[in-house]
Amino acid sequence: MSAKTDGLGGRLALADRDELSVAQRKLFDHISVTALQWAHRSGFAATDPDGRLIGPFNPSLLNPKLAAAFLNLQTAEQQHTSLDEQVRQVVILTVGAVWHATYELYAHSSVARHAGLSEAVITELAGGNEPAQLTDAQTAAHRLARQLSTSHGVDDSTYHDAEQIFGAAGVFDIAVLTGIYHTVCATLTAFAIPAP
């Protein structure tokens, strides 16, 4: 990792590609053609002005094999989920709010805008609230993700509402998505990574 020159890495220095091992460069390049392009399309920064990775991408370079496997899980979730993009973003913002993960909330507020969620809904979710404007499906997903994230349990009523709307497979998809973003938020929190 390079010298710590700014606060975007939190507790870590931002890595310069030229100083990385072969395995780290391979992961850096993979992130550059996948996640960074998605971030650019979604309207949030995933690199600093010098092209160094920020957000959860910089610490992923610490363990390229584990990070590559995790990125594969994220890709599989995106490609094979039964959830629509607005519901996915409701879940992700719900998890980010529980963790107070500023980078996650910054990034996925932008993604949620592109998915069509209103600014009022995004603000409420990012603040840890349940917006009144959510659809029934979004409300059920939000409540399930919130209970999983705060009490590490799900009451029968919340499960029933989610199962009625999404089916058991959809409940599974919400649980997996919630878990993925717990991992992302835990990484951001462990390294105190801020929003740019």
Image (spheres, grey):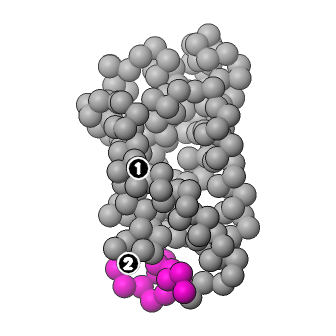
- Amino acid, disc 1: Arg
Choose top left, top right, bottom left or bottom right for residue 93: top left
Choose top left, top right, bottom left or bottom right for residue 97: top left
Please rate how many residues cluster around mark 1, counting C-alpha atoms within 10 Å: few if below 14, some from 14 to 19, many from 20: few
Q: Which residue is mark 2?
A: 50
Q: Is residue 41 placed above or below 93 in the rendered structure?
A: below
Magenta stretch encompasses residue 11: yes
Whether residue 71 can be seen here: yes
| Position in image of residue 101 (x %, y %) | 43, 53
Please rate how many residues cluster around mark 2, counting C-alpha atoms within 10 Å: few if below 14, some from 14 to 19, many from 20: few
Q: Is residue 187 placed above or below 4 in the rendered structure?
A: above
| Residue in view at x 58 percent, y 13 percent | 165
Q: Earlier in the sequence, mark 2 or mark 1?
A: 1
Q: Which residue is mark 1?
A: 41
| Position in image of residue 170 (x %, y %) | 65, 23
Q: Main secondary structure of the magenta part?
A: loop
| Residue in view at x 50 percent, y 17 percent | 137
The stretch of residues the image draws in magenta is: 1-18
Quadrant location of the N terminus in the rendered image: bottom right
- Amino acid, disc 2: Asp
| Position in image of residue 24 (x %, y %) | 64, 76
| Residue in view at x 44 percent, y 54 percent | 39
